Amino acid sequence: MSIRIKRFKRGKIISEINVVPYIDVMLVLLVIFMVTAPLITTGILNLPEVSKTAPKKENVVTIEIRGNESIKIKSPNDKLSKVVTPSTLLENIERIQSSYGNSAVVISAEKNVPYNRVLQTIEALHSGGITRVGLLVKKKK
């Protein structure tokens, strides 16, 4: 009797990734999420209610400083502007403040006005006891 030795043929090397186990894991995770999702309860959120009120309109005095050194004052409810000199500016603002209460003052200046002139106006207002002073800016289009 002769003994035969089987020689195994060397097969091809498998160079592909077996993705079946990954798909099995992903399907199990999907089933877990589908089962647990309905069990999650959301809390009831009670938000406070607010009554609708109109915003309070504040009285604002506008000071316009122009390039030719002229100054215009517009009081809160007046449609007309009054041209004043730098020496009478504070007197006019104080008169408007006494009639409308402690209203805010907004300064608007043209581009060609030196900033030093705007600072002098702010300092004059502060020296007169007016503390609520702001600058008016234009929005970019």
Image (cartoon, rainbow, N blue to C red):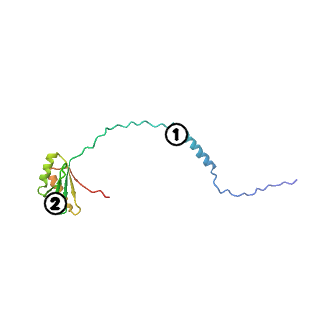
Q: Is residue 77 left or right of residue 139?
A: left
- C-alpha distance separating marks 1 and 2: 71 Å
- Outermost residue toward the front? 79
Q: Amino acid at mark 2?
A: Ser
Determine whether label 1 and label 2 are within 8 Å by CB.
Answer: no
State which tag comes first along the sequence, 1 or 2: 1
Choose between 17 and 98: the one closer to the eye.
98
Q: Amino acid at mark 1?
A: Ala
To which quarter of the image does residue 43 belong?
top left
Dot 2, how many residues are within 10 Å of its Cα: few (below 14), some (14-19), or many (20+)?
few
Residue pointed to by mark 1: 37
From the top left corner, tell me how far across and down residue 111 is, in percent.
23, 62
Dot 1, how many residues are within 10 Å of its Cα: few (below 14), some (14-19), or many (20+)?
few
For residue 33, above or below residue 121: above
Choose between 13 and 64: the one closer to the eye.
64
**Label 1 element class:** helix
Choose between 72 and 131: the one closer to the eye.
72
From the top left corner, tell me how far across and down residue 15 is, in percent.
65, 57
Q: How many circles with numbers are drawn on the protein? A: 2
From the top left corner, tell me how far across and down residue 116 is, in percent.
19, 61
- Outermost residue toward the right? 1
To which quarter of the image does residue 56 belong?
top left
State the residue at coordinates (19%, 57%): 64
**Label 2 element class:** loop
Pick the quarter of the image with the C terminus.
bottom left
